[in-house]
Image (cartoon, rainbow, N blue to C red):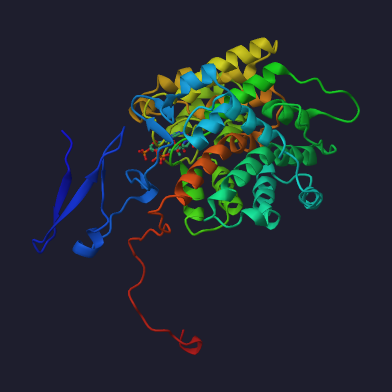
Amino acid sequence: MSKDAYTLTGPDGKSTTLPVHKGTLGPDVIDIGKLYKEQGVFTFDPGYVATGSCKSDITFIDGDEGVLLYRGIPIEQLAQNSNFIEVAYLLLYGELPNKPQLDAFDTSIRTHTMLNEGMLRFFNGFRYDAHPMAMLSAVVGSMSAYYHDTMDVNDPGTHDIFTHRILAKLPTIAAAAHKLTAGQPFVYPRNDLNYTENLLHMFFAVPAETYQINKIAAQALDLLFILHADHEQNCSTSTVRMAGSSGANPYSAIAAGIAALWGPAHGGANEAVLRMLEEIGDARNIPKFVARAKDKSDSFRLMGFGHRVYKNFDPRATIIREMCHKVLAQMGRTDTPMFDLALALEEIALKDEYFIEKNLYPNVDFYSGIIYKALGIPTSMFTVMFAIGRTVGWVAHWREMITDPALRISRPRQLYTGPVQRNYVHLNKR
Ligand code: SDX
């Protein structure tokens, strides 16, 4: 039985009634807006484990049931029937597009893939061993130095061109970063190719020979981008909302999201999973690493396991695991030691009391790197691939936030545990 309000009574006997808001799905929320004014206290929720930061119509997750809906449509149905550009439209505009809408959206994305030549010159300044996420966040942030026509966040007439530009240019910027680290010449985008074919072309084509698009790889990437497109108020999306709430330009808000995604606890986990599997090396070593993950004195964690919300299987991991089998088989890859090791690790971990007790299941990052590796994408580029898929989710949330009439700047409070007030001591007295 849900309640319409909760009453909190302070030590002085004064009561405050806190209203409850109900969503269409998921837990109700208690509105604490008047708590501090009436009771003189803040709430305290480090890591925002049980705190709703906003209302949103975009994505719903049920962590216990392993449910993920994009604008109400189950991820499994979108993975089965849709493609990334169509899913991007759904997340941005709330409905699946009809044919004319889809064609217009696809054409606009295809015709905005080129970078300003000045932006390309940034890449000459990076060291050959610069991490691609460092280049991605820098060059995406630099878009605010070029596209002055989309800096007024309160002009909704500019939101579409911003959206189409950044969705279209992310793969081009990613490919330029890859080419720099590979020591190969930059490859310009082609408007005759679809989103993932173009990305493969820019990644792998070289002037010395004609590049043949691998259709299986293009389809695999398309599905991975669908699965990574959005995920409610995760760390990087919340960062985009936080940065955007000050009225900062949208390119800078997205660059902030890229920075947050880079962390190994978040999007950086897919790169960390591959490095962990390389370190484990052989299934015989798995028990030793599982023991380390359980040892509180050891900071090691099984990367790709656990999730703040999913206390059951991450539905995306299930889809990607099945996809691994198919893609590796379709690509004729029989040498799949990394995949076999991942399967063995998953089997052992899921039988371990510690992982069962703490509901630690494989998440979206556990298998994705194996597919990226099979497609020839370098490990250091894995989180960049996550960013390409997630950009549409970041943009959808930015648009929802910036057009919300109730928008206020995000500014949390704290529990202060520092020194009480004291006087300055001059240097000669210290
Ligand atoms: C993503 O939020 C999202 O939606 C993110 C994401 C998205 O699409 O945007 O789904 C993408 O970021 C997936 C997560 C990728 N990260 C990893 O795979 C890194 C490894 N996992 C963890 O570091 C951890 O599980 C998190 C960060 C994912 C979740 O952290 P929480 O919710 O803060 O949980 P916690 O760190 O408090 O862990 C709870 C317990 C702890 O033990 P106790 O202190 O209770 O004894 O579980 C343990 C942790 O030590 N634990 C792990 C573990 N993850 C949690 N122990 C070993 N190995 C792990 N991977």
Above/below status of 189 relative to 48: above
From this viewpoint, which residue is outermost toward the front? 100
Q: Residue at x 55, y 23 (%)?
A: 285
Q: Is residue 353 left or right of residue 304?
A: left
Q: Residue at x 74, y 41 (%)?
A: 177
The image position of residue 182, as x and y in percent, is: 80, 36
Give the quadrant of the N terminus.
top left
Q: Residue at x 50, y 22 (%)?
A: 78
The image position of residue 147, as x and y in percent, is: 68, 53
Above/below status of 150 relative to 99: below
The image position of residue 50, as x and y in percent, is: 32, 43
Q: Nearer the viewer, residue 122 or 295?
A: 122
From this viewpoint, which residue is outermost toward the left? 13
Whether residue 80 is visible = yes
Q: Residue at x 77, y 32 (%)?
A: 202
Q: Nearer the viewer, residue 142 or 130?
A: 142
User: Quadrant of residue 327 in the image?
Assistant: top right
Q: Is residue 244 left or right of residue 47?
A: right
From this viewpoint, which residue is outermost toward the right? 208
Question: How many tags in the picture?
Answer: 0
Q: Nearer the viewer, residue 413 or 154?
A: 154
Whether residue 85 is visible = no
The image position of residue 281, as x and y in percent, is: 62, 24
Dividing the image into four equal quarters, which quarter contains ligand 1?
top left
Q: Nearer the viewer, residue 187 or 41?
A: 187
